[in-house]
Image: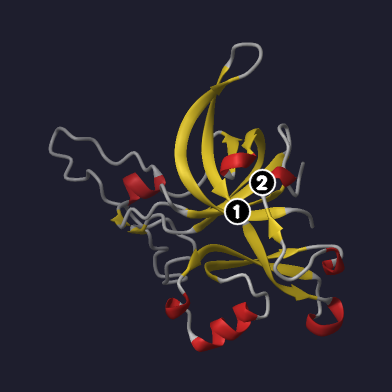
Amino acid sequence: MGKGLIGKKIGMTQVFWDDGASIPVTVIEAGPCVVVQKKTERTDGYNAIQLGFDRKKEKKATKPLKGHFDKAGKGYFRHLREFRVESPDEYELGQELNVDMFNIGDRVDVIGTTKGRGFAGVIKRHGFHGGRATHGSMFHRAPGSIGASAYPSRVFKGTRLPGQMGNKRKTVQNLVVAGVRAERNLILIKGPVPGSRNGIVVVKDAVKS
């Protein structure tokens, strides 16, 4: 449990550290995020705050969500996420949280949705080698045998087969904050993070730091 923000992946670039090393970084526009709701152990069974990100017009909010957002009185948002906290009382409804809560060198986990690559075969999806291309082998990109004979007469769960590739929730742990640009709500994360440009990500304190 710790600090966290909702953000939008802008893209990748590089920065230079004091020793002259070139560091690849992912640029994330994180925040400002608004505290929309506080959840407590007494009322909800756990302590958390709900943050809103990316404002939208009032006419694009449904009536139930409009009433939900009106309690904070800070507008309407496209994205909502919950973050576990030790004490929700430390936050106020309508309070804005910004990237200045992070510092260079902090360890963070980044959660995003990987790029969807559609239906893929076992070679692209799982890295199978496939069969030889010559001498009339007739076996090239197929998955090969998947059964188990007469017993147990079924395909085991988890067998690597063709199917949808990507478009799944993914967490990359223990990434390093390489820079913070508070005036532009930008945070620079060393290395790549899941998702495509303009994809929504969550940046929060690393669990295993």
Q: In the rendered structure, which amino acid carries the disc numbered 1?
A: Gly
Tell me residue 190's x, y (percent). 59, 33
Dots 2, 1 in contact, CB < 8 A: yes
Marks 2/1: CA distance?
Answer: 7 Å
Q: Residue at x 72, y 39 (%)?
A: 107
Is 192 drawn above or below residue 156 in the view shown? above
Residue at (52, 37) in percent of width and height: 26
In front of the other: 30 or 205: 30
Foreground of the two, 130 or 44: 44
Q: Position of residue 158 (x, y in %)?
A: 49, 61
Which residue is at 78% across, 68% downward? 92
Q: Along the polypeptide, which appears first: circle 2 or circle 1?
A: 1
> In this image, 203 relative to 135: left or right?
right
Per the image, label 1 sits on a secondary structure element best described as: loop
Kindly indicate the quadrant of the structure image that contains residue 49. Answer: bottom right
Q: Which residue is mark 2?
A: 99
Q: Colour scheme used in the picture?
A: secondary structure
Q: Nearer the viewer, residue 132 or 64?
A: 64
Question: Which circle marks residue 31 in the picture?
Answer: 1
Residue 201, picture quadrant? bottom right
Task: State the image coordinates of residue 36 (x, y, percent, origin top left).
Answer: 67, 71
Quadrant where the C terminus lies? Answer: top right
What number of labels is visible? 2
Disc 2 marks a residue whose amino acid type is Val
| Quadrant in the picture for residue 88 | bottom right
Return the residue found at the far bottom: 63
